[in-house]
Image (cartoon, helix red, strand yellow):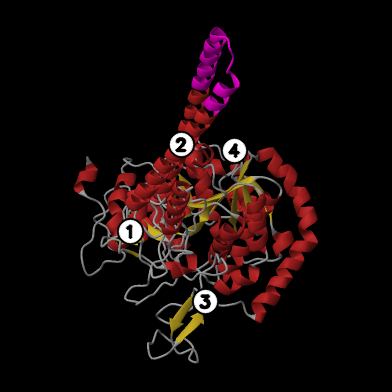
Amino acid sequence: MVRLRENRSIRKSSDMQSSNNSKSSILVILLFSLAALLSLYLGVLSGMNISSSSDKDNSNVVNCDEFERKANIKIKEKTLQSELEEEELIQQLANERLKSALAFISESDKAVPKADGTNDDTDEKLRFGEKMSIFASGAVSVDKLEFKKALDYGVVDFHRPHDGEKKAMVFYSSKKSLPSNKVDAHSAMYNDGKPVPELSVDEAMKNCDSVNVVLTHPEKDIAQCTAIVGGYESYTMQHWMRYNAEKKGSKIDRQHPLVHVGRGKQANGIDSFQPPSTYNIEEHWKDLLRYVNSIDSVLNELKPIARGMKRKNTVITMVCNKGQATLMMNFVCSAKAKGFDISNVLVFATDKETLDLANGMGLTAYSLQKILGKMPTGEAKRYGDRIFTAMMFAKVLAVQLINHIGYDVLFMDVDLVWYKDPLELFHNDESLQEFDLIFQDDGSRSIRYAPFCANTGFYFVRHNPRTRYLFTALLYSGDVIKAAKSHQQALSALLSEHSSLYGLKVKTIEDPEQLPGGYQFHQMRLWDMIRKIAIGKIVPWIFHMSWTLNKADKLLYMKQFGMWYLRDECVDKSSSFIVQELSAKSTPGGIAAPCCSAEPLITCYYRDKPSAKNCNDSPPKDNRERKVEFWKKWMDK
């Protein structure tokens, strides 16, 4: 009994001290307990055997010696078998206890911190302390590019990323999410005098059941702070800034307290996101009223048109008015010269002249006048002017209507040409199949288009409930479009919100060699790539002449860069003029036959703009104080 009490006392003592002793002490105590337990079991077993043997000997006292001898043999055999069975049972119990002890020690590798932040078996402190453990139990860093590849969240990077953002930080909300490797997990949790461990994305994220991705890049020369606060989960960012809130357009000023602002508020005082005015709202009501009153008949007319022209469930849509019709005609000429199938291109015309020209060029066209009423027929003089803004709502309709009736949509502006059929990219590239929307990179890194920097002049939309509601929401945002003078800004805001709210999968193609445009055209530091396109060493899918002031400049740049296929006699001419003056009526190809060239019509205008041939003898466009030439001698080979 004394031995038993001592053993129980030892076990009780070891239980009370296990949370405070080191791992080696725990192991010694547990093994000692196991040894004591084994001794206890063996002692009990021996006592049982002695008692059993004694009882059986007394009960078998007879006068016959032979009977006594045989009985004793049987008793010994039975006792031996019983002893073996008891020993086997004791061994099993001992093994189970030992396995349990080792598992406890293994679990103790993730040491339990005390209230003061120190570890029981070391003097190390938690990296972030107990009071932040709900969202920062530990942290590691991973390579940013590897992270973006593993979790492709679709956004583009800055054109020249800072060295200080080549890594991403991963915070762990609990011990369960820590890396599996014990050394890495310990270093992630505890301040061991070293930076947080750098791991591969697979190692860092292996035990993460979910991941929240936060993107941030401070404005240049701004002392920005980022606060992560435990609380009700939020998927939007609150923005605060020091400025004089009573003075409109006030810049950052440390003399003032922090004030809650919208995400469009910048250090220079400009606020890129202003709510629509009463006038914008009420004018949009008129647009919506026309839409609602005509939508049933419009959809009934569009359904058979789309059904008859779709290619792999995709309809290509364009929007055009009379002022931009020349660019639309050039697209048709370039596509015909290269043999592309454009039978599924649907032009949404905002006036009758454009409707006739599109039909004359062999395209399917549909008039939007029923929904839009009277629209400007002239060309926009610059980005954001009255005509430009008026055409933005038409561009929304061109996607919303076709997407709503069940088709994928490739929307294109008219100021581009194909080098390869872009539908092959969107239909066949396996890396793009998971995305709902795929955009050309606009090039701008303005806060207005963050974070996707989506160019709304060339993008692909898969029909599904997420995209259908996205463009319904954009339709309802016509007042925002009027206020911002662009549907690009309104759509960019909705992309961010719907990505978070509904899981909309958005992708902007960052590789400029696939979908180059005006941004690359005008950036001299990117001209090596443009030169390779000019001489055919790089063959992109399309070239979009965006980032250009107006139609007049677009024509000159496209002619010089080998993108122009429309003959001069058809430029800015009506369909009736072309039919009458060029005898197009008798031509099988309609007005396309006399208007289109089979080869690009290249003309030099400026030596400091990209060109498809040597234009170094031409005057400069922008660089009059220094000699800048696009064409290089190696390009002549």
Taking depth in this image into account, of 133 and 339 the one nearest to the observer is 133
Q: Please report the bounds of the magenta region as a residue range.
A: 52-81
Q: Nearer the viewer, mark 2 or mark 1?
A: 2
Considering only order in the chain, which callout, 2 or 4, is on the residue closer to the N terminus?
Answer: 2
Name the residue rendered at 32%, 50% in the picture. Answer: 24
Local SS, label 3? loop
Q: Residues within 10 Å of mark 3 (few under 14, many from 20)?
A: some
Q: Nearer the viewer, mark 1 or mark 4?
A: 1
Taking depth in this image into account, of 61 and 246 the one nearest to the observer is 61
Distance CA(mark 4)–CA(mark 2):
114 Å
Distance CA(mark 1)–CA(mark 4):
92 Å
Taking depth in this image into account, of 416 and 510 the one nearest to the observer is 510
Residue that badge 4 annotates? 587
Considering only order in the chain, which callout, 3 or 1, is on the residue closer to the N terminus?
Answer: 1
Residue that badge 2 annotates? 43
Distance CA(mark 3)–CA(mark 4):
59 Å
Please, what is the three-letter code of the amino acid marked with disc 3?
Answer: Gly
Q: Is residue 258 visible?
A: yes
Residue that badge 3 annotates? 262
Residue that badge 1 annotates? 121
Please, what is the three-letter code of the amino acid marked with disc 1?
Answer: Asp
Q: Position of residue 67 (x, y in %)?
A: 57, 9
Q: Nearer the viewer, mark 3 or mark 2?
A: 2
Q: Is residue 65 magenta?
A: yes
Q: What type of secondary structure mainly makes up the magenta span? A: helix
Q: Position of residue 278 (x, y in %)?
A: 66, 81
Taking depth in this image into account, of 599 and 540 the one nearest to the observer is 540
Considering only order in the chain, which callout, 4 or 3, is on the residue closer to the N terminus?
Answer: 3
